């Protein structure tokens, strides 16, 4: 299969297109034909390994997994003997920062990991970018212990994490104040924020509100 491969850490130039054997799913894995993926901050961070601690997960001197791509959307083509959640033909998407693989034509992932069936109305290109930012946003929200009716501020509400945080907080019933630049005020309002402040014209710290959670992104 064709894949974007990196065998050493470094800048984007260490990645090249090459051929690798098509992976075979283990008994608890599914084989996915990748239809869409992304290149995001997680991929770039593990590719460069400039944040040295990442090497303890990906390989101290060289990457264990030559194919990056933590976000993916595609079609299940084969399932392991113990898999009951999926069948061939299922459209799936997810997040895999353990074994990666989204930058190849095919990838394997455990059926109980970060993969689920796609909503019928989404295209592969729409589903693939959903999970990376939302994964980090949800982790921070859950760690904060914020509850319905409390208030949160999201500073940097237009990035992958920030835009996901606004929507997830509203889903949990939180009152959200979002901070962004002036040109994106309308966009952030459309995400459901209760109040939107442009940092170019206002100081969001001048307020009588008491926030349970402040996300600086």
Image (cartoon, helix red, strand yellow):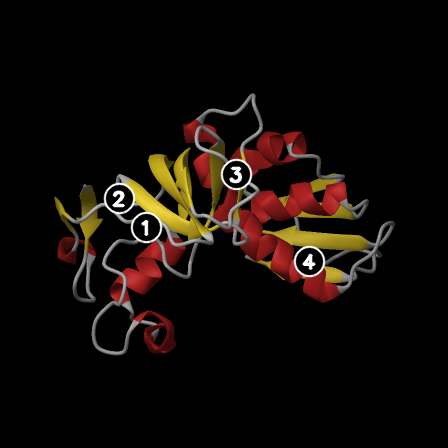
Q: Is residue 157 in sight in this rendering?
A: no
* Vertical position of residue 179 compared to residue 53: above or below: above
Which residue is disc 3 drawn over? 86
Are the residues at dot 1 and dot 3 in contact (C-beta closer than 8 Å)? no
Between the residue at mark 2 and the residue at mark 3, the CA separation in whole angstroms equals: 21 Å
Q: Is residue 25 in sight in this rendering?
A: yes
Q: Between tags 1 and 4, which lies in front?
A: 1
State which quadrant residue 146 falls in. Answer: bottom right
Quick one: 175 or 145, which is closer to the camera?
A: 145
Looking at the figure, which quarter contains the N terminus? top left
Which residue is disc 2 drawn over? 104
Which residue is disc 1 drawn over? 101
Q: Residue at x 83, y 60 (%)?
A: 210
Quick one: 183 or 74, which is closer to the camera?
A: 74
State which quadrant residue 168 falls in. Answer: top right
* Vertical position of residue 69 compared to residue 194: above or below: below
The secondary element bearing badge 1 is classed as loop
Mark closest to the chain's N terminus, 2 or 4: 2
Which residue is disc 4 drawn over? 141
Q: Is residue 208 left or right of residue 55?
A: right
Using a 10 Å C-alpha cutoff, classify the residue at mark 1 as few (fewer than 14 neighbours), some (14 to 19) or many (20 or more).
Answer: many
Q: Between tags 1 and 3, which lies in front?
A: 3
Residue 79 percent location from the top left of the image: 43, 42
């Amino acid at each position: 299969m064709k894949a974007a491969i990196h065998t050493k850490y470094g800048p984007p130039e260490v990645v090249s297109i090459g051929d690798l054997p098509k992976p075979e799913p283990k008994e608890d894995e599914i084989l996915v034909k990748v239809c869409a993926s992304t290149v995001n901050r997680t991929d770039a961070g593990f590719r460069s390994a400039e944040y040295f601690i990442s090497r303890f997960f990906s390989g101290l001197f060289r990457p264990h997994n030559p194919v990056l791509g933590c976000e993916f959307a595609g079609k299940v083509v084969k399932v392991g003997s113990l898999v009951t959640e999926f069948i061939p033909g299922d459209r799936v998407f997810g997040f895999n920062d353990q074994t990666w693989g989204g930058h190849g034509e095919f990838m394997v992932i455990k059926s109980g990991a970060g993969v689920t069936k796609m909503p019928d109305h989404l295209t592969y290109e729409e589903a693939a970018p959903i999970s990376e930012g939302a994964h980090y946003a949800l982790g921070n929200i859950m760690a904060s212990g914020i509850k319905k009716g409390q208030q949160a501020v999201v500073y940097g509400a237009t990035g992958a994490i920030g835009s996901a945080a606004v929507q997830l907080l509203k889903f949990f019933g939180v009152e959200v104040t979002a901070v962004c630049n002036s040109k994106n005020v309308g966009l952030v309002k459309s995400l459901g924020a209760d109040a939107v402040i442009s940092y170019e014209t206002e100081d969001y710290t001048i307020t009588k509100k008491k926030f349970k959670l402040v996300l600086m992104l």
